[in-house]
């Protein structure tokens, strides 16, 4: 099992933003979820989002994908204001990929049929579909699992499959919602290595939202801590765990990442 490199990969990052959320406020039934939030996601960065339930982590994903419009503010992708663009245009034109916490695959279909189904949506030419699927099968070492129905796969195998399905469209921005939830230690380390490879080999910007703080912090370049609809801390894993506000409102005094 590969050793996870910590708080690093500086050579892959640039100062250029691929996503920018500007002055975004979001309300649900008069309850404010995000309060004038500003966030820049750098190109080819692995960004982690942490915070208590209900602070707006999933809402940020929804703003980027178009599942939710901000009541105020703008969403910028690749320098273009996409605030009014529908979901399908954002995913196709700006190469978004989403790995949801639950679902994302059809349980009664085999692994291969799940991959074929998604490829037929995104890739018109049959030869290119087969080429992309073969690449993913090799990349994720799926060879022995292709004819097994998704419902019979382990939790880690299902998560790998959903990530592979999200990569069919060659995304430049990949959103991972709770990827480490309910997985064993070895599977989590395997997923951490996959995430690092997506950054270094596939040149993808990755955004991770998870409650497994240590697992998240062990594979990101930068983390933000959300509280009361605002970002209260932002920086490297070492910087955020020592931030006074982050310790008071999220980590507590005893938290460490060793």
Image (cartoon, rainbow, N blue to C red):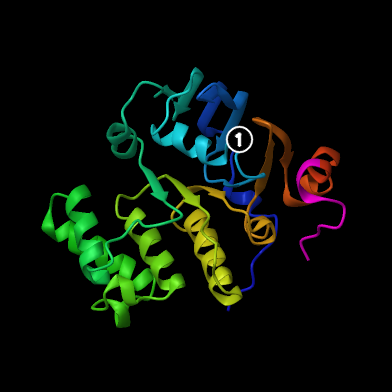
Q: Position of residue 59 (x, y in %)?
A: 51, 35
The majority secondary structure of the magenta stretch comes to: loop
Secondary structure found at label 1: loop
Q: Quadrant of residue 247?
A: top right
Q: Quadrant of residue 188?
A: bottom right
Outermost residue on the bottom side: it is 144
Inspect the magenta stretch and tell me whether residue 256 lies in it: yes
Front residue of 64 and 46: 64
How many labels, in total?
Answer: 1
Front residue of 16 and 231: 231
- Position of residue 84 relative to residue 213, above or below, is above
Region rendered in magenta: 249-258
Q: Which residue is mark 1?
A: 15
* Residue at the (20%, 58%) spot, across then down: 117
Label 1 Cα crowd, 10 Å radius (few <14 / some 14-19 / many 20+): few
243 vs 208, left or right, is: right
């Amino acid at each position: 099992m590969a050793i996870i490199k910590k708080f690093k990969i500086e050579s892959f990052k640039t100062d250029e933003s691929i996503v920018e959320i500007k002055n975004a406020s979001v309300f649900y039934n008069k309850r404010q979820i995000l309060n004038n939030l500003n966030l820049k996601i750098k190109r080819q960065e692995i960004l982690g989002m942490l915070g208590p339930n209900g602070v707006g982590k999933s809402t940020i994903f929804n703003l980027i994908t178009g599942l939710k419009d901000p009541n105020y503010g703008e969403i910028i992708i690749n320098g273009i204001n996409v605030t009014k663009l529908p979901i399908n245009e954002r995913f196709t034109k700006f190469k978004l990929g989403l790995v949801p916490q639950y679902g994302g695959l059809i349980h009664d279909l085999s692994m291969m049929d799940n991959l074929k189904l998604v490829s037929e949506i995104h890739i018109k030419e049959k030869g290119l579909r087969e080429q992309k699927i073969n690449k993913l099968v090799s990349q994720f070492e799926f060879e022995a699992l292709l004819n097994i129905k998704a419902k019979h796969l382990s939790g880690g195998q299902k998560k790998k499959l959903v990530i592979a399905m999200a990569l069919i469209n060659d995304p430049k921005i990949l959103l991972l919602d709770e990827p480490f939830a309910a997985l064993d230690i070895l599977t989590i380390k395997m997923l951490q290595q996959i995430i690092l490879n997506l950054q270094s080999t596939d040149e993808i910007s990755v955004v991770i939202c998870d409650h497994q703080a240590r697992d998240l912090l062990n594979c990101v370049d930068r983390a933000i801590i959300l509280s009361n609809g605002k970002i209260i801390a932002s920086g490297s894993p070492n910087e955020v765990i020592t931030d006074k506000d982050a310790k008071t409102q999220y980590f507590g005094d005893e938290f460490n990442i060793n």
